Image (cartoon, rainbow, N blue to C red):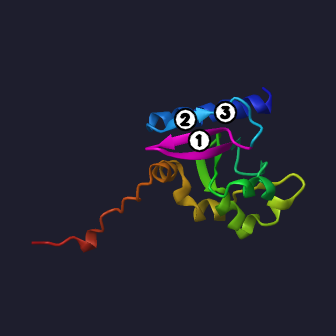
């Protein structure tokens, strides 16, 4: 199967999952502006670009010029082999020292080695949904802090 067809299928996987979370999805018909669609929740809209691959390496098309257009644009990196995502805003990608050089290459790209997967652990699916819905992460109760009567 052609890699563009694989990418488009993975976009639909992400769109379907967002719809299931009651987030509105407006996919673009033409992918010539660096976004795959707009997602919305409670009147707040976000531009979204989805990058998918069979691993976390060499997610292409994430260059400084593209990232600088809208610092709030959300980039979803979907590892379809592991069925996991990490999401970033353009601003986060531009400010990450690990990607400072590779986003300026002739074929710009980012990699997500284990150190960055760990650093952005909260940028998983649940984190994306919280971000889009602007909900705070719920803290787990600390057993030691419970009062006994």
Disc 1 and disc 3: Cα gap in Å? 23 Å
Tag in front: 1 or 3: 3
Query: What residue appears at the point 53 percent right and 32 percent down from the top-left corner?
Result: 16
In the rendering, at what x and y percent does residue 2 appear?
A: 80, 28
Name the foreground residue: 32 vs 19: 32
Whichever of callouts 1 and 3 sits on the residue coming sooner in the sequence is: 3
Residue 25 numbered mark, or none? 2
Dot 1 alpha-carbon crowd within 10 angstroms: few under 14, some 14 to 19, many 20 or more: few
- Residue at the image position 54 percent from the left and 45 percent from the top: 45
Q: CA distance from mark 2 to mark 3?
A: 10 Å
Q: Residues within 10 Å of mark 3 (few under 14, many from 20)?
A: few
Front residue (pair 59, 89)? 89
Secondary structure found at label 3: loop
Q: Position of residue 14 (x, y in %)?
A: 58, 37
Q: In front here: 82 or 95?
A: 95
Reading the image, the residue beneath label 1 is 83
Is-magenta flag for residue 48? yes
Residue range in magenta is 34-50
Of mark 1 and mark 2, the one earlier in the sequence is 2
Q: Indicate the secondary structure of the residue bearing disc 2.
A: strand
Are the two marked residues, 1 and 3, in contact with CB atoms closer than 8 angstroms? no
Q: How far apart are labels 1 and 2 at the CA level?
A: 20 Å
Which residue is labeled 3 in the image?
Answer: 28
Is 142 situated above or below 24? below
Which one is nearer the viewer's eye here, 120 or 39?
39
């Amino acid at each position: 199967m052609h890699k563009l067809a694989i990418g488009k299928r993975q976009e639909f996987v992400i769109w379907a999952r967002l719809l299931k979370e009651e987030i509105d999805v407006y996919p673009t018909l033409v992918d010539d502006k660096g976004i795959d669609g707009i997602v919305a929740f409670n009147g707040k809209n976000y531009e979204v670009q989805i990058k998918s691959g069979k691993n976390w390496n060499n997610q292409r098309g994430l260059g400084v010029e593209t990232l600088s257009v809208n610092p709030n644009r959300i980039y979803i990196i979907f590892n379809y082999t592991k069925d996991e995502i990490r999401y970033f805003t353009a601003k986060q990608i531009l400010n990450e020292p690990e990607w400072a050089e590779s986003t300026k290459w002739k074929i710009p790209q980012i990699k997500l080695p284990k150190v960055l997967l760990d650093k952005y652990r909260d940028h998983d699916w649940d984190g994306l949904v919280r971000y889009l819905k602007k909900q705070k992460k719920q803290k787990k109760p600390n057993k030691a802090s419970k009062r006994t009567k």
